[in-house]
Every structure is written in structure tokens, then in C-alpha cells.
Amino acid sequence: MRRFAAIWFPHLVADRVLLRRPEWRGKAFALTTLVRGKKIVTVVDTIAAASGIMPGMTAADAKALVQQLELADDIPGSEQRLLEALARWCIRFTPIVSVDLPGGLLLDISGCAHLWNGEENYLRTICRQLNSKGYTARMAIADTIGAAWAMARFGDGISIVPPGSQLSALLPLPPGALRLETVLLERLHKLGLYSLRDFISMPRPALRRRFGESLLNRIDQALGTAQEWIEPVLPVPLYEERLPCLEPIVTATGIEIALQRLLDALCTRLQQEGKGLRCAVFNSYRVDGKIERIQIGTNHASTNREHLFRLFQLKIATIEPALGIELFTLQADKLEPAVPEQESFWIGKHGLQDKAVIELLDRIAGKLGADRIRRFLPAEHYWPERSIKAAVSLQERPATHWQEYRPRPIRLLTRPEPIEVTAPIPDYPPMLFRYQGKLHTIKKADGPERIEREWWLENGRHRDYYYVEDETGARFWLYRLGHYGTDQPQQWFLHGFFA
Amino acid sequence: MNQANPDLIRKLKREILSLQGYRTPVAEEPAVDLPLISQAFPNGIFPTGAIHEFICEGRNGMAASAGFISAVLAALMKDRGVAAWINPVRQLFPPALRRFGAIPEHFIFLDLPEEKDALWAMEEVLHCGGFAAVIGEIRQLDLTASRRLQLAAEKSGVTGFLLRQHTVALNTIASIARWRINSLPSVQEDDLPGVGFPRWQVELLRVRNGQPGAWTVQWLQDHFKTEVPETIALPESMHRKTG
């Protein structure tokens, strides 16, 4: 069964101002913001509100009501930021906390309250801690988000709706407890429906016709017949293992032991669920509040403890323990289904599926960077530079055939190098060329092989390739850029070396 | 005693060979078909699970060595083996490997400009039994580093190839063989125009416990053709006549 808690801060921003400026305690104050050149009151404290100052007034009017009114600028977005910070703080009570603007927080406390000896105690603990921080808060626990929200705002400080009895708790509340739009609230008010009791049992078609789907939806959400979810401020890592330490840890050996324990726990869990790890983060929470993190990635879903440990081990030296580490967490960011293989069957099997190969590549990627490792597949392009593409994964198969019917050099220069050539026209192979100051006389040649530039990708001239051999037997791949006879000068390049 | 002697001597010889880095060949292993040249090695087979060192002269020498090695690798990588090619910057053009019978997608390229990283990676690959071979384009390495590589190769059975360029200071390293491969002018049958099959002068400068020598090798689409040259470098005119 799910239980939700709603926390409402009636004077959240005002409380914050008082924390910042304790000298304003007991005084009337208001926060203002500039709207079209006029200072408009946005936030008031209880004393100012008692004197009749309301949000929406101009600062001058407010000042006329209360002469000693203190004014300060309202920083836009500060409420949201404050609530987010409070939501993060609340994670110690439950992992699922969300911000509920305006002025509230929502907590999914299913399975958490018993750790504080019951819901009553749970709420009192939160309340006491918030009060000690200087925030007034009202809160409620109910089966549904809607009911908790309503009871936090319209209940008496701390209210707990027993499981299943949200309907009876909601009956005396005004329609505003249903989180409705102002238009709907006004319409309900005009019709004399001042509490939920007056209309909650009306026939649904009648309600839908008069007030639309949203009212019904809100009623269903409050009563629990419609589902509602909250979006946590911090996504809950599904696969996370935590290891708190009694004494802060400063040595590499200590970190390794912690890592090993966490890996054991995580891998056991992943194995049971038939999953394998592709990407994991190891966080070390330092005493001084900083978080040191190291990350690893694997080429293939893995639950092999030793292998994963070795990947992390390469990076443990980068962790700076400073005064000590008090908490380690290991979280799996990326998982893939892993079929538990018959290991003995695969041992000794060479190839890209070999576990030893995959694990070694992981290790190299971990130490030297994954971008250093490349495997190439054929691409459907004739242009030599584009005729190969890097494979995305080790498992990727070639989508097309390797081009074989034309000679290709075993070593291709990354950038073709210009050469000086003597060649008879129109398209005979060159007779001799000079490369890096050395003259090569061409004895044998094949070609030309014309490769057009792919006009849909780039502009430029085509290449006429020649496979040539000089007097010593050295074999080259040369090309001429473009046609003869144009006004541009002839350019010849050396592009590769044949075996 | 006298009858036992030949057996004993053969056994002892085998042991000495294994101490020197030659593995006793296993029947189902893919064998490299290098006619004539294999005879230069003890047992008459191309040794796998060891380090071969190639001295390359210039970029053409690199290309010639790469071609020769690719053809050897094609035999070693039969049955879906993978090879790692470690280089500072990749210059090998994978489509050309098809010409030598190797499967380009089974090559894993490691671009490691730092010599230290490259040596580390090469040793790791040699330790890992999953690879068929590893090729390292490493400029400088000392005897100790090469001994580590050789020991790793002996242990795992992975064959290592070291491509060494800039041979100004050519120090001795621990390898089972030192090769030098240079291109020779190709030969076309019946004086056809165009460039023929790749043809190299293959020299075994140093072989541990074997016979150094020099051969002329041609790669004919799917196999090597080896000849013992009459002279090391034939003048140009002679080639024309043989064609």
C-alpha cells in the first residue's frame, strides 16, 4: 500500500527572509518586485498580513497602511530553489521527494515511516527538524497525494489520515482542497457548494457537464481511484549499493575493500536478475562534503567481479580522500540484459565474442581512453577516405562487402601529399615524380581509376588514381585532381603505399 | 642405452628449443604456409607464440612489411581470430587487408602515440589469450621491454610482430627472428602491361637457432610463392627476360 506525505510551508519565503535578516523578527515586512515600473508586493509576513497588506498591492499602498513596513526585493525563482534544497534535504526521510509549487513538498513515504516508529513520529521528526531550522511547516499523511495535499493545507498542523479513510477526512473541507483552478472554484462558490460534502456524491455525468473533466479527475485523485505519480527531485538510481563507514577511510586499500564489497553486492543482484553492467559510477562521499567519483564503461554487459574491479582499480589512484571518506556508493547507470553463458563452452574460443578480448579492451579503454580503440567496417562509398567507417560496437557486423576488385594501398596517408609529376597527356600514367626530394621513375602503372567526388556531400574535383611502381619496386598510389585543360593548374598527390 | 640415445637426444633438443622460445606445435593450430622460408626455422615451421621483429626502411618498407604480415596473419587468424594493431597514428588501410586474405573487421586498431602506452597495451594483448596476433609499430624499445613481450608471447601463445622504423640505432632485442622486407619490381606474365602481384625480397637477418637467409616472395592472390634468388638484387634487365 502506498502512503504519501505532503508538507506545506505557509510562509516559506518569509521564513527564509527572517533567517537572513534576524533583525526583522517581530516587524512587518514585505517583498516587492517591479512590474511595469511599479513596485508590487509579492510576499508578506504574518504581522504585515494581519495589518491588511496582501500580495498584489503596490508598495506605496502597503507603506501607507503600515508606516514601519520593511521592504526588500523579491528574487524571482527563489521559492523554487529553496524548495528544491529542502526536497534534497528530505531525501534522508524517503528517496522519493518532489517539489510541489507553490510552497509545498510531496513525499512518497511507502515503507519508510516504520523506521521512525510509525507515521506520527515520522511527521513529528520532520516537523521538529524543520522548525529548528526556522521554517513553519504543516504536514499530513494519507493514501493519496490529493488527500495528503488537502489535509496539509486545511488540517490542523500534523494530520494523519488512516488508510482507506480519505473520503471521510475530505468531506468537511472546502473545494479549494481539491487543487482546482480559480475559475472552477468561483463557479462552485457561486452555486453554493462550500464544502466537498455538498457535491462529492453528485452523479458524475452532471459534474462533468457543469465543471468539466478536471474536477472529476481531481476528485478521483484525492480518493485514490485515479493514479497519480510524483516526479522525484533526484532520480532514484535503480541499481545502487551503499556502504557507510564507521571511521573515515583514507587509504587506497580501504577504498579497494569497500569497492570489492559493493561490487559483490551489485553483481550478485544483477546476476539474479539476468542483467549485466555497461556503465557504473563509484562515488566516494568525503567528510568535507565533496564527492569523488570514478566511472567505468564496458564493451559488453558484464557481471564479472574481478574484471569490473580491475577496471575501477586503474582509476582508484585518482580519488583524493582528503580527510577521509564516510560513504561509498556504487551505482549502475547503464544495464543490459546479459544471458548467463556457459563459460566453459566459450573458453578458448577466439574472436570478437571472446570474453578475454572484450575484457582486455575494457581495460585499455579504462586506462587510455575508449576513443583510442577502433575497428573498421566497410562503408558504401568509393571515395577512399569515406570507404571505411568506425564500428560502433564490437558486435557490429559489416553491412556491406569490402570492395576488392580495385587495388587499394595497404598504407593510406591521412592527408594526400602533393608531388611533382611529369606525365604525358591526356591520361597516361606519369613517367616520373618527385616525392620528398627523391625522384622516382615509373616503370609499371595501372590506371586511371576515376573516383568522383560525392557531390551530395561536398564540392570539388574528381580524382584519377594510378597504381604505379618505380624502378626499385616501390609501389605507390598517386592521383591527379580534376581534368586537364582547365585553367586550374594540375595538381598531383601521393595518397598511399602498396605492399 | 645406445638405443635410447636418439630418442633422448630428440627429447633434449625439443626441451632446448622450448627454452629458447619455440613452442611445440599443436596439431590443430593454423599453420602459416611459407614454403622454403619455414625451413629456416627449427622444426621447419613458422614459429607462433613468439615475437617477430621487422626492420622497415622508409614508408615503402613499412608498406611491404605490413603486406607480408597481413598475409601471415590471414593464416594465423583463421577460425575467426582477432588481431590488435597498435600504432601511433593509424595508416593501415583496412580494405587492403582483403587482398592478403585477412578479414579487416577482425582487426582492432589502437592509436597510441605514447611509446609507454603502446608497450603496455602490447604486453596486455600478449598476455590475453583471446587474440591471434598483435602488431606493434614501436620505434624504440630496449632489451628488457622486448624480453617482457617475448615472455608474455611464449606464455599465452599469441604471436607478436614488431614493426620498427628509423633503424639508425638498431639495438638488439629479444625476438625469435629479425626480418627485413623490401619491395621488388613485380613480374607480369607474358609482358602484360600494368603492375603485377606484390613481390618482395624477404630477408631473415637473425633467427634464433635457425638459418638466416634471403628469398624472393610473391603473394599470388591466396598463397605465397617463394624462390631462392640467384643474386640478392637482380638488375632490371634480368626481370624483363624472366617475364
Image: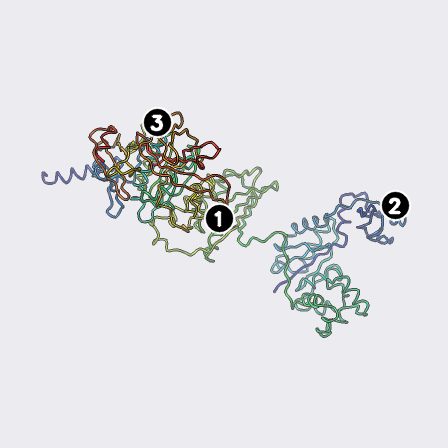
Q: Looking at the picture, how far across and down is residue A162, in whole percent? A: 67, 66
Same chain, labels 2 and 3: no
B3 to the left or right of A226 = left
Can residue A31 be seen in the rendering of this structure? Answer: no
Amino acid type at mark 1: Arg
Residue A244 circle label: none
What residue lies at 82% left-to-right and 68% top-to-bottom?
A: A190
Amino acid type at mark 3: Thr
Image quadrant where one finds the N terminus of chain A: bottom right
User: Closer to the camera: disc 1 or disc 2?
Assistant: 2
Image quadrant where one finds the C terminus of chain A: top left
Q: Earlier in the sequence, mark 1 or mark 2?
A: 2
B5 to the left or right of A222 = left
Can residue A175 be seen in the rendering of this structure? Answer: yes
Q: Looking at the picture, how far across and down is residue A63, in whole percent? A: 88, 47
Asked which secondary structure carries label 2, the reply is loop
Asked which secondary structure carries label 1, the reply is helix
Q: Looking at the picture, how far across and down is residue B130, in whole percent? A: 35, 45
User: Closer to the camera: disc 3 or disc 1?
Assistant: 3
Q: Residues within 10 Å of mark 2 (few under 14, many from 20)?
A: few
Q: Looking at the picture, how far across and down is residue B2, in whole percent? A: 9, 38
Image: A133 above or below A316 = below
**Residue denoted by label 1:** A261
B114 to the left or right of B3 = right
Q: Residues within 10 Å of mark 1 (few under 14, many from 20)?
A: some
Chain ID at mark 1 = A
Amino acid type at mark 2: Gln
Q: Residues within 10 Å of mark 3 (few under 14, many from 20)?
A: few
Residue B167 circle label: 3
